[in-house]
Amino acid sequence: MPAGGSRTCYLDHNATAPLRRAAADAMAGAQGEWGNPSSVHGHGRAARRLVEEARAEVAALAGARAEQIVFTSGGTEATDRAIRGPGRDRGRARVLVSAIEHPSVLEAADGIETISVDGDGVVDLDALSRLLAAGGDRPTLVSVMLANNETGVLQPVAGVAALAREAGALIHCDAVQAAGRIALDMGALGVDMLTLSAHKIGGPKGVGALIVAGDVALDPVLRGGGQERGRRAGTENVPGIAGFGAAAELAAREIGAAQELAILRDALEERVLGAIPGSRIVGAGVDRLPNTSCIAVAGLSAETQVMALDLAGFAVSAGAACSSGKVSPSHVLRAMGLGDEIAGCAIRVSLGAGNSRADIEAFTDALRDFAARAA
Ligand code: PLP
């Protein structure tokens, strides 16, 4: 794909992945099944079948059971419910989350306490132990993501879950960025709740799932109907759910190909480090998602890089995808102890199935040329 050409080279798959053809087809097909999935007649049963098929596919992607899936309006809603839904003793409850969580976790409730991360962006298990010990017998919920959206750094979620369980705490994991990129097994992770989002795996936007282990009592997201086993009222978004199911099926099948993106990612990083003075890769020393590279070029603001790259035909993000179009310094990089000279100069390149070595070469040439012009 040519740099500066009429087509944009899309390197921002952590913001959203292109809609898969199979997901679009499943959604179009589901529009034809307009029955209400709660109706007992044939129209209703046809729509119900689509919802339940999708439920099985999403469960398979996460190593969970179909009845554990609660379909939601996306990752943000799923996480909101995970953090605010476990109703017991809510007034006294503590919520401990890693300092590098997505805002949907960090801002889900008042009084959230953060668990620090080390210089590589990995959650500090000793810090978690200390926080858990300080809580006495207060009911506690711990939330730690499986993979960070800005750096791709993987988190020791099974270790977090073991500590949380020992302390009698519930554990939630935001697996939105990990799904489809590394194998997921909710049982092996040992978590009580897991969040997924369809649009990060090539499904539609506005659909997600909270996966809830059998013994977790959850207040419903929305009240006033028995849908989703009483955990989220309201007639289901059948086309969206069908698209999610189709995307989940393919994402699970293509997990090996997703792993191979690490070869492209490594080539990208080698070229960047070799060609651009003052460049560094954040989190390079630890396990990361295969598709994600957080590149800081000293002295070049992230915002300027993103705009210059956009003009050159490359779509990337400045750290986190900025929900308002405004780029602010990354709380993730700050939590890693990086000053603004790095945190303000970091862009995120996130690869996906459509990317090629030629994309990587054209991208690194464009970044190198921009850095040279700006020097
Ligand atoms: N969690 C992480 C790690 C994310 O990257 C995102 C989206 O950027 C979300 C949650 C929110 O998901 P959704 O866009 O489906 O609400």
Image (cartoon, rainbow, N blue to C red):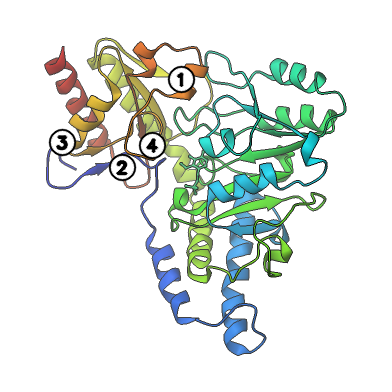
Q: Is 223 above or below relative to 353?
A: below
Real-space Cα separation, disc 4 to disc 2, in angstroms: 20 Å
Front position in the image: 304 or 298: 304
Left or right of residue 265, residue 217 in this image: right
Please give the label number shown on residue 311: 3
Real-space Cα separation, disc 1 to disc 3, in angstroms: 26 Å
Amino acid carrying mark 4 in the image: Ala
How crowded is the residue under tag 3: few (<14 C-alpha within 10 Å), some, or many (20+)? some
Q: Which residue is mark 4?
A: 321
First along the sequence among labels 4 and 2: 4
User: What x and y, as percent, mark residue 70?
Assistant: 65, 58
First along the sequence among labels 1 and 4: 4
Real-space Cα separation, disc 1 to disc 4, in angstroms: 14 Å
Q: Is 350 above or below relative to 133?
A: below
How crowded is the residue under tag 2: few (<14 C-alpha within 10 Å), some, or many (20+)? some
Q: Is mark 4 within 8 Å of ligand 1?
A: yes
Q: Which residue is mark 1?
A: 333
Amino acid carrying mark 3 in the image: Leu
Real-space Cα separation, disc 2 to disc 1, in angstroms: 26 Å
Split into 4 quadrants, where in the image is the C terminus? Answer: top left
Real-space Cα separation, disc 4 to disc 3, in angstroms: 18 Å
Residue lying at 39% horizontally and 22% vertically, measured from the top left? 329
First along the sequence among labels 2 and 1: 1
Residue contact between numbered discs 4 and 3, judged by CB atoms under 8 Å:
no
Q: Which residue is mark 2?
A: 355
Residue placed furthest toward the bottom: 41
Q: Is 340 above or below relative to 76?
A: above
